[in-house]
Image (cartoon, rainbow, N blue to C red):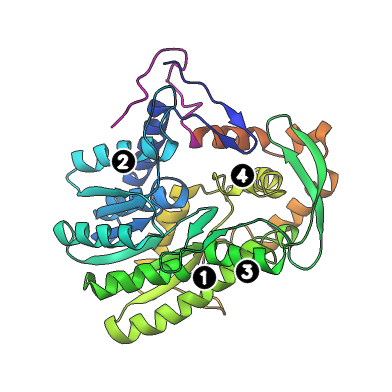
Amino acid sequence: MIIKPRIRGFICTTAHPEGCARHVQEQIDWIRGQRPVRGPKRVLVIGASTGYGLASRIAASFGAGADTIGVFFEKPASGVRTATAGWYNTVAFEKAARAAGYVAESVNGDAFSDALKAQTVELIGKTLQKLDLVIYSLASPRRTHPRTGERFSGVIKPVGAPYCNKTVDVQTGAVSHVTIDPATEEEIRHSAAVMGGEDWAMWTDALDGAGVLAEGFRTIAYSYIGPELTRPIYREGTIGKAKDHLEATAQELDARLRQRRGGRALVSVNKAVVTQSSAAIPVVPLYISVLYKVMKDRGLHEGCIEQIYRLFSDRLYAGTPPALDGAGRIRMDEFELQNDVQAQVQSIWEEIRTDNLETVSDIRGYREEFLKLFGFGAPGINYDVDVDPAVV
């Protein structure tokens, strides 16, 4: 079939297998061009098929020579439907990793369930035996609690008061104002249950209880803080409340792992990038478009793969304990939050309108990165020819 992007709101409902494979290969090639990391050799990535999770798996294997297991929920092609981008990404990664001599196994299903945790533990026992590193990079709008059966749905809302700011229709380029009503207490609770630290702790408990954590084991969860500009909808909103829970969980896990295994549980605060998750947050796509222009002009821009390589090489496996902020977090967002960067972002924000969007922001780059997530726009690929969507 001939596969073209079909965009509905902030998602693309199609994905291109060859384009996704090209995107994965680009990240592999970039990592191979960097200094090798003296890092982990047995890695589990929970949420491994896109964004920071995919970059983590690539950096682990092709940067540190690690065998990996990836956990995710993705769908294969069916009838006239393409597979999800994460499916194609994983197929491409596994082929490349195995060709290079690395173990690359995957578990596809509901990562929140006890059954999938048990399935993963069994696979670890058959392949990696022990884990040196677990990356928790799961992003989902919904979660069913494995013990109580309660179903939670996360929301993206401010807390306490309505939030009004500029936003953009990425496809049309129309800049407008959006007002978002505050979340209810129930919505705050649900969002923390979906995006907080409870499932990360359950994964750690399941792995520890099964005896598959090596001495000196580390587990890292990814978070985001962002600037004052997005604070009401992000860090002080429902997502931020969930991230507060995630970071509190990190402190509890860290104390336990340090005492029992000489291990660590840490949160890495990463920079804003174009992902399927960030595209869903009002205001954020416009902010990222402005941020990208400023950081690219200053030579400070990093995508997922550059950010995660620096996390591995300069923080986690640099030979010394990673520097932490006052809240005990690794900060990879220091370039984004530089005072001069944010001052320029704020200056552009105040003047940005529909008629000057293309010149004062990198909306074009945002669109390109968004399509790239789904395998579109890759150089050298003819998108007008038939391809088989059923890639396995």
Q: In the rendered image, which quarter contains the N terminus?
A: top left
Q: Is residue 268 above or below residue 373?
A: below
As shown in the figure, which amino acid type bears the numbered disc 3?
Lys
Q: Nearer the viewer, mark 2 or mark 3?
A: 3
Tell whether position 378 is magenta. yes
- Residue bearing mark 4: 279
Q: Amino acid at mark 1?
A: Leu
Circle 3 sits in a helix, a strand or a loop, which is it?
helix
Q: Residue at x 72, y 49 (%)?
A: 283
Q: Earlier in the sequence, mark 3 or mark 1?
A: 3
| Eye-nearest disc, 1 or 2 | 1
Asked whether the beta carbons under mark 4 and mark 1 sit within 8 Å of each other, the answer is no
**Closer-to-camera residue (269/386):** 386
> Is 236 left, or right, of 391 in this rendering?
right
Residue 138: x and y in percent read 45, 56
Q: Residue at x 46, y 24 (%)?
A: 379
Residue bounds of the magenta highlight: 373-392
Q: Residue 366 location, x and y as percent? A: 62, 38
User: Could you say which disc has been placed on residue 241 in the image?
Assistant: 3
**Mark drawn on residue 246:** 1
Q: CA distance from mark 4 to mark 1?
A: 21 Å
Q: Position of residue 237 (x, y in %)?
A: 69, 64
Nearer-N-terminus badge (2/3): 2
Q: CA distance from mark 3 to mark 1?
A: 9 Å
First-in-chain label (3 vs 4): 3
Give the number of the mark in front: 2 or 4: 4
* 3D distance between C-alphas at marks 2 and 4: 24 Å
Q: Is residue 147 left or right of residue 160?
A: left
Kindly identify the amino acid type of the residue bearing the numbered disc 2.
Phe
